[in-house]
Image (cartoon, helix red, strand yellow):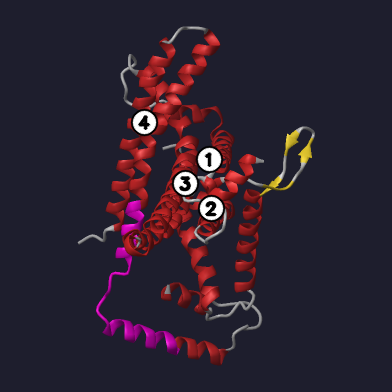
């Protein structure tokens, strides 16, 4: 109970103390759900994932409803996002990657919408939790590995054997290559999560500076915050882009093995 | 963009023409107008801002790669030590191997970024 009161005071930033900048990342259970001892509650995180999915679906369905020859504003936006990912897949994976286009498009749109939704005040940023990004990244990692083995069989193991290396160094380099391959899900997930969490924490900290310094001194951090919000929107887009393009590059490695 | 649209418009279709001949003629006319207008204007560089954003995105890749290599190497060493009961030796070995893998990843990403930027710059 005392905790709750403290959390409540923190949330509103009243009582003189600094509001907790990490409070925004707290997971709250909306609908309690217990499936055979596993806590599968519908949380605020799940809620914003559903909102992102609904927004993406309605954006694409309603903007393409007119199917105009000369696209309107919304339709060109939808066509633009399609072309953006289609050319990314074409350039980075090649013709063999066209069948994976739906997956990469879905991935990009989901990460982009989750990041952008987080920029709206009072929302929850799904991608600021490492478990979410790690689940996405490890799914990509496993899928890419399965695709590689399905395509090349045991021959994919040659991917870990660099060419033109003296036999003495080979065992060492194979281990290093293997570790380098295994870092993929970590670097992919940490990059997205760290960028989103750091940015949102920073915004919150500077927000409390604005309130703390009052009418006299608060303008400097406020100006910084305006600029930083712009940067955060850029980062939200860039991280979705980097996530998608790295998936393309991993897919390319799996399909072409170099 | 204009090129692909014209290719789509002129592709011979089987069956009924869904757009109609008159509309198509008007579209072709519009296209020539656009081409004319484009010819009058000096060639702008719309890609400049986009390329800068892409470069920033690429730069963000590098820092994490190094850390991830070290962490994964250390974790593998720690886990193998726990499994085989071989003191801190495997942890130390894999820590350094992981760092090597991280550096390898950074160098590879840097090469990749360079190749990409070379490809994007038009031959002068």
Tell me, yes or no, whether the highlighted magenta stretch contains residue A50.
Answer: no
Chain of the residue under label 1: A
> Image point 51% across, 29% down: which residue?
A155
Residue A177 position within the rendered picture, expressed as x and y whole percent measured from the top left: 41, 27
On the rendered structure, is B59 left or right of A112? left
Nearer-N-terminus badge (3/2): 2
Q: In the rendered structure, are the residues bearing label 1 and label 2 in contact, judged by CB atoms less than 8 Å apart?
A: no
What is the C-alpha distance between the residues marked 3 and 4? Answer: 23 Å
> Image point 77% across, 39% down: which residue?
A34
Residue of label 1 = A130
- The numbered dot on residue B102 is 4
Q: Residue extending furthest bottom? A: B22
Residue of label 2 = A111
Residue A27, above or below A145: below
Closest to the camera, between mark 1 and mark 3, is: 3
Q: Which stretch is magenta?
A: B29-56
Q: Residue extending furthest left? A: B124
Nearer-N-terminus badge (1/2): 2
> Image point 49% across, 64% down: which residue?
A83
């Amino acid at each position: 109970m005392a905790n709750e009161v403290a959390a409540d005071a923190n949330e509103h930033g009243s009582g003189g103390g600094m509001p907790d900048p990490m409070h925004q990342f707290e997971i709250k259970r909306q609908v309690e759900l217990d499936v055979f001892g596993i806590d599968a509650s519908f949380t605020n995180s799940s809620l914003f994932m559903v909102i992102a999915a609904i927004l993406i679906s309605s954006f694409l369905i309603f903007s393409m409803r007119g199917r105009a020859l000369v696209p309107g504003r919304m339709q060109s936006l939808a066509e633009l996002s399609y072309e953006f990912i289609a050319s990314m897949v074409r350039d980075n994976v090649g013709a063999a990657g066209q069948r994976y286009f739906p997956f990469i498009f879905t991935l990009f749109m989901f990460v982009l919408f989750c990041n952008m939704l987080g920029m709206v005040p009072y929302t929850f940023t799904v991608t600021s939790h490492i478990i979410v990004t790690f689940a996405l990244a490890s799914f990509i990692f496993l899928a890419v590995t399965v695709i590689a083995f399905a395509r090349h069989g045991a021959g994919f193991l040659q991917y870990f054997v660099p060419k033109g290396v003296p036999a003495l160094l080979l065992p060492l380099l194979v281990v290093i290559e293997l570790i380098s391959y295994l870092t993929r899900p970590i670097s992919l997930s940490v990059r997205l999560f760290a960028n989103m969490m750091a940015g949102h924490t920073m915004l919150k900290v500077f927000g409390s500076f604005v309130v703390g310094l009052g009418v006299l001194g608060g303008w400097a951090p406020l100006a910084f915050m305006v600029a930083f919000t712009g940067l955060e929107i850029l980062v939200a887009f860039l991280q979705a882009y980097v996530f998608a393009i790295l998936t393309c590059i991993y897919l390319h490695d799996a399909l072409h093995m170099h | 963009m204009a090129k692909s649209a014209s290719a789509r418009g002129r592709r011979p279709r089987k069956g009924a023409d869904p757009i109609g001949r008159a509309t198509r003629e008007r579209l072709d006319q519009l296209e020539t107008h656009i081409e004319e207008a484009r010819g009058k204007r000096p060639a702008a560089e719309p890609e400049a801002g986009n390329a800068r954003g892409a470069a920033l995105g690429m730069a963000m890749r590098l820092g994490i790669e190094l850390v991830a290599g070290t962490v994964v190497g250390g974790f593998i060493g720690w886990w193998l030590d726990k499994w085989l009961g071989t003191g801190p030796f495997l942890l130390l070995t894999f820590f350094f191997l992981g760092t090597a893998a991280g550096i390898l990843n950074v160098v590879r990403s840097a090469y990749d970024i360079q190749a990409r930027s070379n490809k994007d710059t038009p031959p002068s």
